């Protein structure tokens, strides 16, 4: 029991490729350390509707497999109704829906309480431009 | 640092169509304002197992694309094992699993901390009857 | 308003089958009761990258339908790039991405604030070995 604490930060991305999977575990861990929160949760949430966040393996083959699955389910360049607005990123919206745009990571003893293989990734589905992600930690 | 606060509310839906995507950003924002929470998180979570919640674009074409994807992956009226119970909404359960039934939105400076295009939607997959969603805000 | 509280616990699974869907609502409810938290949230999060957590129906047909969908989208034994590392569980990583590895359940009046049909399941996609899940409750 005790006083409630919170902390907020924003990460910015500008990927070179249209789709890119960026490991951000270290940035989230540093943010949590800086927050002084011992017990709580940190929300890691994309602020764009053409991006996702997942916790999975830092293994290039697995990431290529996931990218191939998403491309199979919602291919780039298909004839999306969204494109009637002039946009060309209909696939990225659908990939965002399938992956989910956020995760919540527990904070225990002042640190991210992740399993041994769990890494946090920002999933860019429509990059080569500035995108943001919010980190929000709450606890005590 | 300071005292911990919380607030709870429930939204009710009764859609005219079986599948419908209802924007609820304003209701969630009003709820957060009323909570008096300056820094925290609000959970937006469907209380039924045939509904979802997502944060995405308020653009009818994109929503039609997502609906078409979900209908392709888990079509209405397919021969689901769930239907042996007498139910006919097996597709809606699967759509709920694929979309996820909840989002968490950060609260910063007393307001929803969303990106410029992010809108919160309740996704009804088996409507024309009363359904509920819970809003739970915590913070300080 | 009041003092902030938190509680942490870990569940361990060792399924007999490779894929198994284990209802854990009662364990999560007991954990919340023990935490003494009246208003807050509990995070239910797999600590492995080949597992998921969902809230859905405790109905074997529906679970079989979801398993069939996941197996159709990311079949066991397909030729995944991840398998070049010597692993054989590429499908399980993809199933985890599709299902999401966590849920957040609101706590109201000291109890899980779930809808009448909502049950929490641990979804094992690569079992027959020890796996862990973290429960983290915060509130007041």
Image (cartoon, coloured by chain):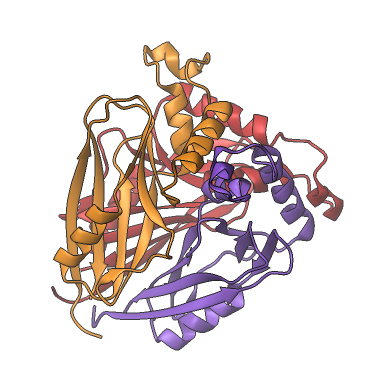
Chain colours: A orange, B red, C purple
Q: In the image, residue A59 lies at what x, y percent?
A: 44, 46
Picture quadrant of residue A38: bottom left
For this view, does B4 lie left or right of residue B91? Answer: left
In the displayed structure image, the side of residue B117 where residue C43 appears, left or right = right
**Vertical order, A85 against A55 (above or below):** above
Quadrant where the image shows the N terminus of chain C: bottom left
Quadrant of residue A46 within the rendered picture:
top left
- The quarter of the picture where the C terminus of chain C appears is bottom left
Q: Nearer the viewer, residue A25 or A108?
A: A25
Q: Is residue C32 above or below residue B76?
A: below
Residue A32 location, x and y as percent?
Answer: 22, 64
Q: Is residue B37 visible?
A: no
Decide: is B92 above or below B132.
Answer: above
For the point 27% across and 26% down, which residue is it?
A: A16
C40 shown above or below B20: below
Q: How many marks?
A: 0
Task: Please indicate, yes or no, whether residue C9 appears anywhere in the rendered image.
Answer: yes
Which residue corresponds to the image point at 31% horizontal and 36% vertical from the top-left? A48
The location of residue A120, given as percent across then percent down, is 36, 52
Q: Residue at x 13, y 73 (%)?
A: B1
Decide if residue A16 is on the left or right side of residue C81. Answer: left
Measured as percent of width and height from the top left, residue B120 is found at 39, 42
Residue in the foreground of this view, choosing between A109 and A102: A109
């Amino acid at each position: 029991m005790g006083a409630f604490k919170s902390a907020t930060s924003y990460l910015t991305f500008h990927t070179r490729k249209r789709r890119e999977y960026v490991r951000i575990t270290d940035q989230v861990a540093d943010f949590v350390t800086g927050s002084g929160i011992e017990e709580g949760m940190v929300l890691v949430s994309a602020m764009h509707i053409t991006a996702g966040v997942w916790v999975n393996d830092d293994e290039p083959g697995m990431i290529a497999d996931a990218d191939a699955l998403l491309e199979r389910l919602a291919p780039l360049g298909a004839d999306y109704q969204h494109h009637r607005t002039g946009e060309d990123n209909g696939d990225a919206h659908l990939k965002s829906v399938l992956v989910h745009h956020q995760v919540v990571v527990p904070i225990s003893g002042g640190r991210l309480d992740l399993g041994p293989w769990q890494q946090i990734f920002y999933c860019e589905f429509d990059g080569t431009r500035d995108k943001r992600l919010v980190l929000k930690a709450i606890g005590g």
